[in-house]
Amino acid sequence: MRGVRCLRLKKACRAQPPGAHRRKPRQESDVTRLEQKLDGVTAILTASQLGALKATDSPLQLPTVPLLSLTTCFDQFIKSMDEARLMLDVFRNEFMPYFPFVVIQPHTSLEELRERKPFLLMVVMLVTCRHDITRQTALGKTLKELIGQKVMTHGEQSLDLLQGLLIYLAWYNVNIHLGGQLTVIVHLVMSVMIDLGLNKHYVPRKYAKPQRDYFRLDRQEGARETLEDRRTYLGCFYLTSLISMTARDFEAIRYTKYTEECYTIISEAAELPSDIYLVQLTRLSYFVDKISRTIIQRDWDPSSSISAPIGAYVKSLEAELRKYKASMTLDIAQSEVLLLMHYHAVETFLCEIALDENVPASRYGSFSTTRLDLLFACLTSAKNFFELFHSLPSSIYFDLPYCIFTIVSHLFVDLSKLALCQHEGWDQNYVASCLNFGDVMDRLSKKTKEASEFLQTNQSAAEATSSQNTLPRCVPPIWLTVPAKIQDIKAVHEARRAEQSRKAQSESQDCDVGVELPGLPFESALLPDTFSFFECLDEPLWQNWA
């Protein structure tokens, strides 16, 4: 390029050194440099913290939902300590005799119970808050949330929690209007019981499950099962057996050698007067378990099939059951009638396989009258049961535990099936003359009205005397709908009877149109096998039927 001139500038062209036109970098400000230094320091500190966490094997802490405070719950829903003491006395005197598996000793003060077993105390407050239904409902909603947090979120395992769940389940009818969760509560009870190890002997860690316990030290030899632990376990066994018999089809807690041991130890110790009632309820639950595993046909249990004729099994268990009745102690304050009701309910449960139309005739053996005998035995037991139930004073109806009414509802279904059963030699008119379904339902409606009137009379008397040692009473909301719901149940029963009559009179098989009641289609007019009295009082269920 040497010697060449630029025509525009009139100058000679010269080669420029490299980078002559490169832009000079902008100098960073002091603020920018300071920010970069701070970012570097932050990165160093973060790295050192992560290194420390790795060195100590500490897990990262994730945010958790704080557990609802039982102290706050008590202060929010209980007006005063005096009110709480009255409610605790009500539980001891009027509720606890019906459920002897969780006992609060007379010498246990409110303050001690609040400190040692706060969850059990709050469930007791829920059950006995019968003088303020609005507050009882709000407390019920709070306790449902608390149960979910304790069991699912925080994985709590304690005798306090298990005993509280047992009382919650025993008076499940108190919260039925908040939504049915019977199966959930039952399995929570079973889960906490298993996690606490109350369903078996303590075994050394090297033999225990889960396997992680192998690497823990064995507990002291003196730490053995207490009578309170055994009562709680038997309460789990009793409730799951009863609910499995009457309301839900699930695998209940089995009667094992350890169950027998708990039964024997409590029977021999007889530490509390209520233990006499407890051991007899446990023995009757043993028969429920035995019947369930020998006679009842369950689709989900392949081992429930039986080989010998049904009549042979029933006769054997019937003899064992009657032998036990002869040894029963019936002079139990406030519990004699309820104990006999349990006995006749088990008798009915033993014979109700005859109501199962899916059992082939061959299963009854070569004796053609076996099923007929079982039907009559079932009717006799049901009649004995309802005679006892109707003899109960109306004043205690609203305080009876859920287990009593789930038995009642189961017997309602059995009676309906007996009244509608079609079998050679079986007379439906005889059933109606012996134990009329409509009359039995009307009797319950009448008893409910009597119980409501009793509460109103006592309430007026209490207001007149202005007594400070008693709490007022309110009729539980669910019982206010009983008379109307009973009429609906009777209508369902009559719809099925009408359908039977129509089929009997029909000469053509083409006529297959069901009888319908206004607003109640026949195809939905069925009393389900797992019919629960309180659940049938639940409004959403009836809305589905309508």
Image (tube, grey):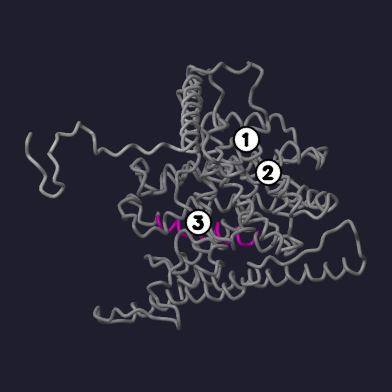
Crowd class of label 1 (few under 14; some 14 to 19; many from 20; radius 10 Å): some
Q: In 3D space, how far apart are the residues under numbered discs 1 and 2 (Cα atoms)?
A: 10 Å
Q: Please tell me whether residue 207 is drawn above or below residue 478 in the rendered image.
A: above
Mark positioned earlier in the residue sequence (1 or 2): 2
17 relative to 92 in the view: left or right: left
- Please name the residue that numbered disc 3 is placed on: 377
**Callout 3, which amino acid?**
Ala
- Residue 232 position within the rendered picture, expressed as x and y whole percent measured from the top left: 63, 37
Report the magenta residues as a range.
371-388
Residue sitting nearer the eye, 11 or 493:
11
- Residue 497 position within the rendered picture, expressed as x and y whole percent measured from the top left: 43, 75
Q: Secondary structure at mark 1?
A: loop
Mark positioned earlier in the residue sequence (3 or 2): 2
| Labels 1 & 2 near each other (Cβ < 8 A) | yes
- Please name the residue that numbered disc 1 is placed on: 158
Q: In 3D space, how far apart are the residues under numbered discs 3 and 1 (Cα atoms)?
A: 44 Å
**Callout 2, which amino acid?**
Phe
Q: Is residue 26 visible?
A: yes
